[in-house]
Image (cartoon, grey):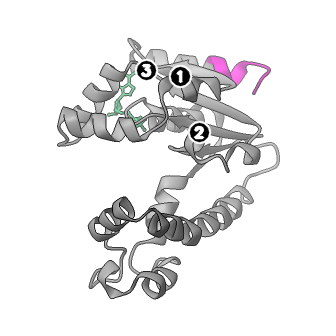
Amino acid sequence: MRIGLTGGIGSGKSTVAHAWVTLGGALLIDTDAISRALTQPGGAAMPAIAQRFGPDFVTPEGALHRPAMRELAFRDPSARLALEGILHPLIGAETERQAGLAQPGQRVVFDVPLLVESGRWRQKVQRVVVVDCEESTQVRRVMQRSQLSETAVRDIMAQQASRARRRAAADAIIYNDGLTLDQLHREVGTLLASPLF
Ligand code: ADP
């Protein structure tokens, strides 16, 4: 079974993804890591990016120049579309390659931060699991693990789908608020044991 796992920043999505692996023996596919690897030095997306955008968007080491690209994508939506046009097929091919490594009967969990936002993921998975928590909890967790200010965290959250929209897309919701990590693991265990999965 293919499961799409999503949640807003700081919801606990990565923690749940790893619990799914340790408790349920799932194969985890980290689409963020795949996307980052494509734009590292020597990454498979770099030749097309250099050709389309030119040397100003490539670091001396050969990686994507993220600040320059962020600024361009902000000003020019067609540039963002062009970048996505390069990245999405490569991400799709790599996720399929990794999913193909699953053992017969092994669950495959796709960790997709923007599953609800992107639209193209829904048809690739049989179930969508959403990790949800209060916005104030998201802010607190992200501020604790990074150097970001509250405003910066809320800016990121504002670019993501709302909790309501994400919840509406879910086959199952893990409400990760007011839980210890042990309790969160138990929630994942309960879900794994349910007939839905
Ligand atoms: P996401 O992948 O959704 O951004 P993470 O799984 O990385 O979120 O969780 C964000 C932070 O909050 C991490 O440092 C994680 O250890 C912590 N965290 C998540 N859920 C809990 C919980 N139930 N109890 C304690 N800490 C938690």
Q: Which residue is mark 1?
A: 164
Q: Is residue 184 left or right of residue 148?
A: right
Classify mark 1: helix, strand or loop: helix
Disc 2 target residue: 116
Contact between marks 2 and 1 (CB within 8 A): the answer is no
Query: From the viewer's perspective, is the residue at label 2 or at label 3 nearer?
Result: 2
Q: Please state which amino acid type lies under the numbered disc 3.
A: Cys
Secondary element type, mark 3: loop
Q: What residue is drawn where x is 65% and y is 46%?
A: 119
Quarter residue 31 falls in:
bottom right
Q: Is residue 132 magenta?
A: no
Q: Which of pointers 2 and 1 lies earlier in the amino acid sequence?
A: 2
85 or 77: nearer the eye?
77
Which label was assigned to residue 118? none
Quarter where residue 196 is shown: top right
Packing grade of label 1 (10 A; few <14, some 14-19, many >=20) is few
List x then y, in percent, for residue 84.
54, 65
Residue type, numbered disc 2: Val
- Circle 2 SS class: helix
Sequence order check, earlier mark of 2 and 3: 2
Q: Quadrant of ligand 1?
A: top left
Q: Which residue is mark 3?
A: 133
> For the residue marked with disc 1, what is the amino acid?
Ala
Q: CA distance from mark 2 to mark 1?
A: 11 Å
Magenta-colored span: 190-197
Report the quarter where the C terminus lies.
Answer: top right
Can you tell me whether the CB of the residue at mark 3 lies under 8 Å from the nearest atom of ligand 1? yes
The residue lying at 55 percent from left, 45 percent from top is 112
